[in-house]
Image (spheres, rainbow, N blue to C red):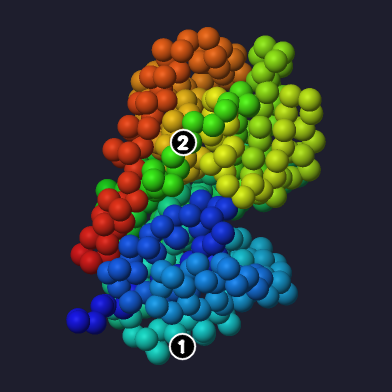
């Protein structure tokens, strides 16, 4: 049997449990990368990795290295970044000590290819010219930060705007250090605004439609919203859903908010008509018991996995133009789109009262994700880019 070529994969987090978009993307990519390559996986981490996470990740790589980032070092690097042009999140993740460990791993294994997820780890790879390098921008982080800055409290606005500016410059600078570049959506590619942005190839996320499959459970909740509930765009969406949209709806409409680490602002939304569950062991149960998925996302960037999951479960979805720009579903055929609270009310009322529209969106949404967001197809396209 021929020896598989070696691929070094560098991630900013251990890709398990699947509670963040970058972890989910990396985990599913590793499943197919491991079949093609001898994968040497390096993950940065600020904490110890539990045994179950380590076991699950090791199933999809040949070697796993978890490189710890100490909080004292992070603090020193963030303070130092105040006097440089480096983005704060790059300073957070780029440790000289970790660089030495990665250099040592490279020297030991001599991989032919290097795959980095997110610009926050690109600093570790940029100095190397001895192998072919691929950078997964994933999202245009700078535009997400710009959107956050506009809504940030006045005392944080200067810092967040500064980070957005640094990220934009850094995203463009990293372009020249990597022979191959990929990104999650056309909308994110446009936001990078590089003169040669067409060289960045689009590799969307996929969805496992065999896993996310409805069991036709009893619909006990009217509206569902899911996600990492400490992540600002999700926090703001949850608040908007409960405070701006719910008061306009019929008094018997109920909402369920599911997701890891709900912030105080999210927990405070709980009430007679609103359930905040926190982390749930099997998110499919929440999807299966809900009638409609509503994602009023006004911040952030990239493709929303929550929409892929809901559509795969046969739940009609309502979201904003911002989220659907990355998704690319056909409004009124595969998804419903709303721009403000009144439009969300109208779309929710339509789905609640029109069985024909409800069934059409449920069926067409499922067909859409099956056709456009298959992990196997996405990963084969990624492998083709890495090989080229």
Q: Quadrant of residue 122?
A: bottom left
Label 1 or label 2, whichever comes before in sequence order = 1
Q: Quadrant of the C terminus?
A: bottom left
Q: Quadrant of the N terminus?
A: bottom left
Q: Helix, strand or loop at disc 1?
A: helix
**Residue count near mark 1 (Cα–Cα under 10 Å), binned few <14, some 14–19, many ≥20:** few
Residue 104's disc is: 1
Q: Is residue 7 above or below residue 213?
A: below
Residue 326's disc is: none
* Residue at point 24%, 82% (across, down): 3
Res. 146 visible in picture: no
Q: Quadrant of residue 217?
A: top right
What is the distance, in whole Å, between disc 1 and disc 2 at their CAs?
A: 47 Å
The residue furthest top is: 353
Please state which of residues 271 and 102 is positioned toward the viewer in this rendering.
Answer: 271
**Residue count near mark 2 (Cα–Cα under 10 Å), binned few <14, some 14–19, many ≥20:** some
The percent coordinates of residue 369 (x first, y second) are: 36, 37
Res. 118 visible in picture: yes
Is residue 93 left or right of 325 when viewed as pictured?
A: right
Is residue 187 left or right of 130 when viewed as pictured?
A: right
The percent coordinates of residue 24 (x first, y second) are: 48, 55
- Numbered circles on residues, count: 2
Task: Between label 1 and label 2, give the one nearer the viewer.
Answer: 2
* Residue at point 38%, 59% (across, down): 29
* Residue at point 26%, 77% (across, down): 5
The percent coordinates of residue 211 (x first, y second) are: 43, 47
* Residue at point 63%, 26% (across, down): 220
Question: On the image, numbered disc 2 is attached to which residue?
Answer: 214
Q: Is residue 278 above or below residue 329?
A: below
Q: Is residue 206 above or below residue 224?
A: below
Q: Helix, strand or loop at disc 2?
A: loop
The percent coordinates of residue 168 (x first, y second) are: 48, 51
């Amino acid at each position: 049997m021929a020896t598989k070529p070696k691929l070094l994969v560098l991630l900013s987090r251990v890709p398990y449990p699947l509670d963040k978009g970058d972890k989910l993307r990396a985990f599913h990519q590793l499943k197919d990368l491991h079949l093609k390559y001898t994968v040497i996986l390096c993950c940065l981490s600020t904490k110890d990795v539990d045994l179950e996470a380590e076991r699950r990740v090791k199933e999809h790589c040949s070697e796993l290295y978890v490189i710890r980032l100490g909080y004292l070092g992070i603090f020193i690097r963030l303070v130092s970044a105040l006097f440089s042009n480096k983005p704060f999140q790059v300073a957070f993740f780029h440790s000289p000590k970790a660089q030495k460990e990665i250099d040592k791993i490279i020297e030991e294994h001599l991989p032919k290819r290097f795959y980095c997820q997110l610009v926050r780890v690109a600093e570790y790879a940029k100095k190397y010219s001895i192998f072919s390098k691929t950078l997964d921008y994933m999202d245009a982080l700078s535009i997400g930060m710009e959107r956050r800055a506009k809504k940030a409290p006045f005392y944080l606005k200067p810092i967040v705007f500064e980070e957005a500016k640094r990220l934009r410059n850094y995203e463009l600078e990293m372009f020249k250090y990597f022979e191959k570049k990929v990104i999650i959506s056309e909308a994110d590619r446009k936001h990078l605004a590089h003169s040669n942005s067409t060289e960045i190839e689009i590799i969307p996320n996929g969805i496992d439609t065999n896993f996310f499959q409805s069991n036709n459970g009893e619909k006990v909740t009217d509206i569902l919203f899911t996600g990492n509930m400490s992540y600002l765009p999700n926090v703001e969406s949850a608040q908007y859903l409960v405070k701006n949209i719910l008061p306009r709806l019929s008094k018997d409409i109920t909402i369920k908010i599911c997701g890891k680490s709900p912030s105080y602002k999210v927990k405070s939304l709980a009430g007679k008509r609103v359930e905040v569950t926190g982390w749930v062991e099997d998110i499919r149960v929440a999807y299966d018991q809900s009638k409609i998925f509503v994602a009023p996302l006004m911040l952030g960037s990239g493709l929303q996995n929550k929409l892929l999951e809901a559509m795969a479960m046969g739940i009609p979805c309502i979201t904003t133009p911002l989220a659907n720009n990355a998704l690319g579903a056909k409004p009124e055929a595969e998804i419903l789109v709303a721009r403000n609270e009144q439009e969300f009310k109208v779309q929710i009322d339509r789905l609640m009262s029109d069985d024909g529209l409800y069934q059409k969106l449920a069926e067409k949404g499922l067909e859409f994700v099956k056709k456009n967001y298959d992990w196997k197809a996405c990963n084969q396209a990624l492998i083709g880019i890495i090989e080229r």
